[in-house]
Structures are given as structure tokens and as C-alpha cells.
Image (cartoon, grey):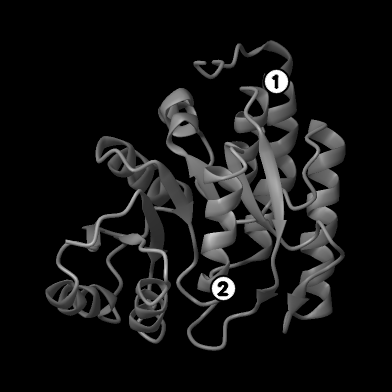
Amino acid sequence: MTASDSIVIIPTYNEKENIENIIRAVFGLEKPFHILVIEDGSPDGTAAIVKELQKEFPEQLFMIERTGKLGLGTAYITGFKWAVEHKYDYIFEMDADFSHNPNDLPRLYSACADERFDLAIGSRYVSGVNVVNWPMGRVLMSYFASKYVRLITGVKIHDTTAGFKCYRRRVLETINLNDIRFKGYAFQIEMKYTTYKCGFKIKEVPVIFINRELGTSKMSGGIFSEAMFGVIRLRWDGWFKKYPKPAN
């Protein structure tokens, strides 16, 4: 068995073009990682590809199959609970489409394991704008959405909508995951805001985000609208809600 203290959670919906390559890329890293795929009933056969790979990687590759497309946030919450239950120390979020470079996983890991940060964020905007092959309109929408979130919430994070992250287990044990309300990309903002309000240490690690080459993007204007209006509610809650604090 290839033991690991780290699990990479990859939500999938219609990712047959990417899923095998991303799994092999992660398993090809020098540091061993395990992978948990949260598969939302893809009609394109994504689950069948993962099941075939599980024969090759029976103790490293895991999958939870769900019926229907239930949302990014609920996929990660399902994965977080599974990872905490199985006692992984470092729990990652990553997309299946290579927009997040697997070679950056060890850098996020080091920020948490060696530098002792509680949350490491693969940040597109901490050192300029590091986005490749996105239309300019989408770049501007994403960049200014993060600026807006930072302004409204007061969270000192440059890339508030980033989906490439590493959590130490104690963060996910402290946060009441059942209280996380957003299901779309506002989920990413809510998790960072909650982590910040709980008093955990956060580091942004600069990465280059490359738009997917294969498959279809799940991003839409409605997703950004949810994020834009959701942060007002988060800020309101932040004035009155009592957030749990990390155990020493």
C-alpha cells in the first residue's frame, strides 16, 4: 500500500476527456497523494473510467458516486467529511481539467505541512494576474469579483474565488460543515471567509491558472451572480455569528 497523509478531492461531471490523465498526473508526483473523486452521475462515462483505474490503484483511488448534479459545494462537503473520517491530515481541492497544475500540489502541501499554515490557496492574483487562455471578459469578471469580495468582507485574500486549496484537517474539524450554505462557486468564498473568521492562518501560493483544453466549462454568469450577492450575506452574518475557534 502507498500510504499518504494527503487526499486530493476532485469533483467530476462529464470529465471523460480529462479524468484519467489528471489521476495519472497526481499519482506520478514524487510525493504520494491519494485521490477521492466525487462523481455526480456523469452521462459521459466518467465513473466507468475511474472504476477501471481503481483496479490499478486500489489503495490510492477512491470514488463516491452521487445521483444527479448536486452542486460543487455539496460535492466538496461530502469529500471533506469522508477525508476527515479517514484521518487525512491534508485535504486538497482540485479541478479535473488541468486548470490547476498537479505539479503545484507539493507547494500547497509545503505551505501547510512545513510552514504550518492552516489553509494554502493556489492564488491567481497574489502576484499579478496569472491566467492563461481565458477571454478577457472572464478574466476581468473573476479579478474584480475577488476585489469586490475582499472589499465587502475585509478578508485579506487576493483570490477569494480560487478553487485550488489545501486544508489542514483541523480546519475542517473546527468548521461546522453543515452550516455552509452555498452550493456553487460562492461556496469557495464562504469557506475562505469562515476559515478566516475562525482565526486560522492562511497563505496564498502563486500559481498559473490555465483554461481547460478538453471538455466543457461549468462556469456561468449566474454562478458569479450568486457569489456577488452571497458575500453581502456573509458579511452580515460576520457581524452577529459566533465562529468556532481552533483548538490549541
- 34 or 228: nearer the viewer: 34
Where is residue 78? Give x, y as percent. Answer: 33, 44
Q: Is residue 186 visible?
A: no
Quadrant of the image occupied by residue 196? top right
Q: What is the C-alpha distance between the residues marked 1 and 2?
A: 33 Å
Whichever of labels 1 and 2 marks the residue nearer the N terminus, that label is 2
Under mark 2, the amino acid is: Asn
Where is residue 216? Give x, y as percent. Answer: 51, 80
Query: Which residue is labeled 2 in the image?
Result: 101
Image point 65% across, 48% down: which residue? 226
**Above-or-below relation of 231 to 44:** above
- 240 or 192: nearer the viewer: 192
- Which mark, by number, is residue 157? none
Q: Is residue 94 visible?
A: yes
Query: Which residue is labeled 1 in the image?
Result: 238
Looking at the rendered image, the quarter that the N terminus falls into is: bottom left
